[in-house]
Amino acid sequence: MNNPRMDVRRLQMLLHLSRLGSMREVAEEMGATTSTVSQQIAALSREVGTPLVEPDGRRVRLTPAGRRLARHAVTILAAVEAARLDLDPDAEPTGTLRVAGFATAVRRSLLPVAADLAAGHPRVRLRIHEHEPAESLALLASDDVDLALVYDYNLAPVSADATVETMPLWSVPWSLAVPHPASHARTRGDAPAVFGAYRDHDWIVNSRNTADEDVVRTIASMAGFEPRITHHADSLELVQDLIVAGLGVGLLPADQPTLPGVRLLPLTAPEVTMRSHAVVRRGRADWPPLALVLRLLAARAA
């Protein structure tokens, strides 16, 4: 390294380039020209004494050294922002926060927070990606997002990873959704008894996550049968449509409206509870934009 001093704005450009993959998009993000971004990345390469980008067709990509420096830039820029706020507590957090989360959490938690940010903290912006939990956690691990909104079930818990920090948000009881009217429906008894009444039905589970299928198989095993998993659907609305069409039964949240042809049967002993969580990489929660959004999420969940 020829020069240990690195310009913070150039580091910001490199980090954006690692995330966006295009100098034009970096220029749009930072209110600069593409030429300026290119010149600043070149200057940063000279500062550190090694090439940081290389041609990739008509675009560019980071070299291995560029990717390593971009990973360091996350920590460096977070520290700079924290120091700025420490010296000036009234300063507004600023930055773009990348969030991956499942649809319900985006609607229930993140959209209200987006409104809070627009009203009170306009310099913090969100980039929202809709994903199932495993996808969101993979994006978090690869530093493609800063925050993951995920879920699990009490009967299908996800083990905590030592590389992340998890903050509980809210939980919702789930029920067995069946066609209505259904003369043979069993509405009383524990969860295995309710499941047992539908042992001969087809079952509907999520197409992009195995957690609810794990719950279905767990309770069915308690009732002494193997569920006939026939349909896979990601959309809760589609699950309801399949049930109305008489194509099967499945799990649905107990706190949401259902179509006229769907009946929710409560599940107890054991209960089925979906639990939502906000997950960040360990050591990143103090980055002011992320810390702000976590506080707003916690306030909304309280």
Image: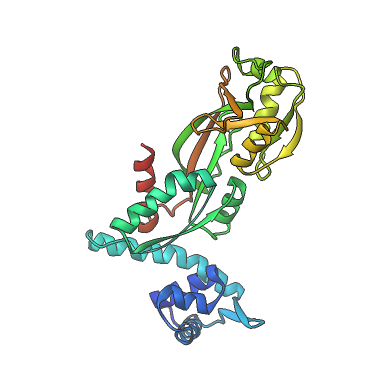
Q: Position of residue 54 (x, y in %)?
A: 61, 81
Asked if residue 114 lies left or right of residue 38, the reply is left
Residue at the location (60% across, 76% down)?
Answer: 61
Residue at the location (75% across, 25% down)?
Answer: 201
Identify whether 182 is placed above or below 298: above
Residue at the location (51% across, 33% down)?
Answer: 257
Q: Position of residue 118 (x, y in %)?
A: 33, 58
Identify whether 288 is placed above or below 278: below
Front-most of 179 and 141?
179
Asked if residue 140 lies left or right of residue 296, the reply is right
Locate residue 161: give its quadrant.
top right
Q: Position of residue 98 (x, y in %)?
A: 48, 59
Asked if residue 296 lies left or right of residue 54, the reply is left
Front-most of 239 and 158?
239
Identify whether 64 is placed above or below 87: below
Front-most of 292 and 165?
292
Identify whether 278 is placed above or below 69: above
